[in-house]
Amino acid sequence: MATIKRSLLGKVSGSAGDFVFYTRNGKRHFRAKPKPRDPDMPKSQKTIDNENGFAYTSSFTKEISKNDLLKVIWKHSDIPAENYYSRIFSANRKRTEPSGLTLHNIITPDNIFLETGSVVLDDEYFSIGYKIKSENQNVLQPPFFAVSVLFLCNPHKPAKENNFVFLPFEKLVTEQFIDKPDIVTFSFNETDKSVLSEFKNGIVYLTFISKEIIDKPYEWTTTAAVEINLAL
């Protein structure tokens, strides 16, 4: 890849000859066109792993982008990237394995530390115990939004056979209790239940976001992740 310092032609994009021109972060670049792959030549394991990791990250990025609350947080993130979508992808690509998402993937950038406890999984709902750690006890007091994304997968099924799916959840937490652990509960609808029956494993991603997100200051927590086993 090379950077075009100055162009007599103005903005350049597209391809010409053996080169492809494009713009990234406001700078113009060019690179050689990739050679077509020989269809008779099998892909290397490295190529297959990279394609799988890319596919999982892209799908996760699209799922996060569907939630307006999460989108606003990423838009205001200081992660270097051209836009919020690129920030989500960039932050998650290095955390994703060829076999799927991990406990290190995130739905919000780092901020107030969130710690999860046990998960209770029922036919009608799932509950997660949590603790928000902050030096300022007045930070992120109710009401605030709880946002969760369930990544469900069949790890031994090839990725090309649609071996994973996402279930999104959002609710307003209106109170916390001093005399018992804080717990947030999300209910399953009928569609959720039918999807859950098709998968064996999963990861719950959870974050909290202040209710008044449009007007600064707003707060959010880090992403907490917990594995679940649906086969039990």
Image (tube, rainbow, N blue to C red):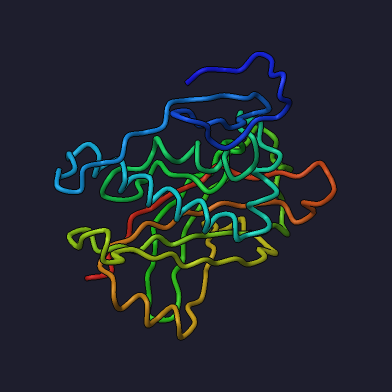
Q: Residue at x 47, y 30 (%)?
A: 17
Give how far across and how far down residue 87 sits, in percent.
Answer: 57, 38
- Left or right, 121 with reference to 134: left
Q: How many marks?
A: 0
- Left or right, 32 with reference to 137: left
Instruction: Out of 204 and 133, give the one closest to the viewer.
Output: 204
Q: Residue at x 52, y 66 (%)?
A: 168
Instruction: Out of 83 and 118, give the one closest to the viewer.
Output: 83
Q: Is residue 136 above or below residue 201?
A: above
Give how far across and how far down residue 82 sits, in percent.
Answer: 64, 34
- Left or right, 130 with reference to 53: right
Q: Residue furthest bottom?
A: 190
Which quarter of the figure is the C terminus placed in? bottom left
Q: Is residue 227 above or below residue 190?
A: above
Instruction: Out of 16 and 213, give the one closest to the viewer.
Output: 16
Q: Residue furthest top?
A: 5
Give how far across and how far down residue 66 sits, in percent.
Answer: 60, 60
Q: Residue furthest front?
A: 17
Give how far across and how far down residue 206 sits, in percent.
Answer: 51, 54
Q: Residue at x 30, y 43 (%)?
A: 97
Instruction: Out of 114 and 70, give the one closest to the viewer.
Output: 70
Q: Residue at x 54, y 63 (%)?
A: 184
Q: Is residue 199 above or below residue 49?
A: below
Q: Quadrant of residue 216?
A: top right
Q: Is residue 137 above or below residue 188?
A: above
